[in-house]
Image (tube, rainbow, N blue to C red):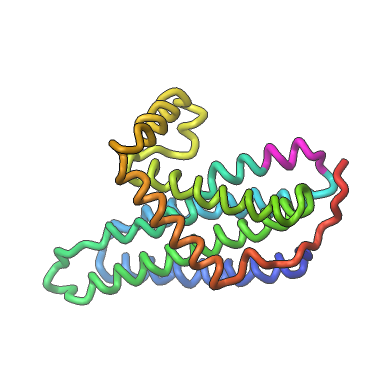
Amino acid sequence: MKHKVVNHYLRVLVYITIVDSLILLVRNLVVGSNHFNFLFWNLFLAIIPMGVALLLHYFYGKWGKLAIILGSCLWLLFYPNAPYMISDTIHVDENCPPAFQNLQIYDALIIFLLAILALLYGFFSLKIMKNIFSCMFGRKWSLFIINFCVVLSSFGIYLGRILRLNSWDLFTHPMVVLKSIFDHLFPISKNPTTYVIIFLFSFIQFSLLLLMKDLEEPVGYSKELN
């Protein structure tokens, strides 16, 4: 993917981010509450994988293969934070104050806007990583890797939303994370909810990606690495 195309997408995302942030700030001023400010933090976490992908994009060919692979692992660790924001819709408050009868729909729309924005950041990073993997491993393997990453990210969403684990917990409490993963995956017969949630989040991502044709982008990198 050429730098010019990447920069164009990045500018568009920045503009949308500014508008969405202003909409949330207006809500805070009108209602007199910062209840939904946690969405800014969640959006920041959703932007991290795009930042990692951009670094890999701009330094591809300058860094060695090992550095690219390690960077890809870091990207995968934070990527679930992007589609995770879909689940923030559970925070819509049904008990709105009488003075703000339309607040519920307004809040729902704000969360929806920010969730879509987070997905765009995530899919943008996914597109970049797909091209990088294509150059490193070929088109067929890159498609397999990306699909596998999407499924893994869906399990990551489960760990974050249901078990309240964070991406950095893998470094600070690795054994706790590994035990939680094992306990909620096996035996399969006792953990059907886990697999249903993984399937649903994977289905949502695959459906959107196929509609956006993000898995069909041409490759623009040199295949040579130091």
Q: Position of residue 99 (x, y in %)?
A: 14, 73
Q: Position of residue 50 (x, y in %)?
A: 61, 54
Q: Nearer the viewer, residue 27 or 57?
A: 57
Q: Is residue 96 visible?
A: yes
Which quadrant would residue 37 be assigned to in this image?
Answer: bottom left
Q: Which residues are magenta?
A: 63-71
Is the residue 112 above or below the residue 169 in the image? below
Quadrant into which the N terminus falls: bottom right
Residue lying at 43% horizontally and 30% vertically, measured from the top left: 177
Residue reaching furthest to the left: 98
Residue reaching furthest to the top: 175
Main SS of the magenta segment? helix
Residue reaching furthest to the front: 189
Q: Nearer the viewer, residue 98 or 54?
A: 54
Is the residue 16 above or below the residue 41 in the image? below
Which quadrant would residue 110 be assigned to in this image?
Answer: bottom left
Quadrant into which the C terminus falls: top right
Question: Position of 44 compared to 213: left or right?
Answer: left
Q: Nearer the viewer, residue 214 or 34?
A: 214
Q: Is residue 70 magenta?
A: yes
Q: Position of residue 63 (x, y in %)?
A: 81, 42
Which quadrant would residue 164 be assigned to in this image?
Answer: top left
Q: Is residue 15 magenta?
A: no
Residue lying at 43% horizontally and 63% vertically, measured from the top left: 115
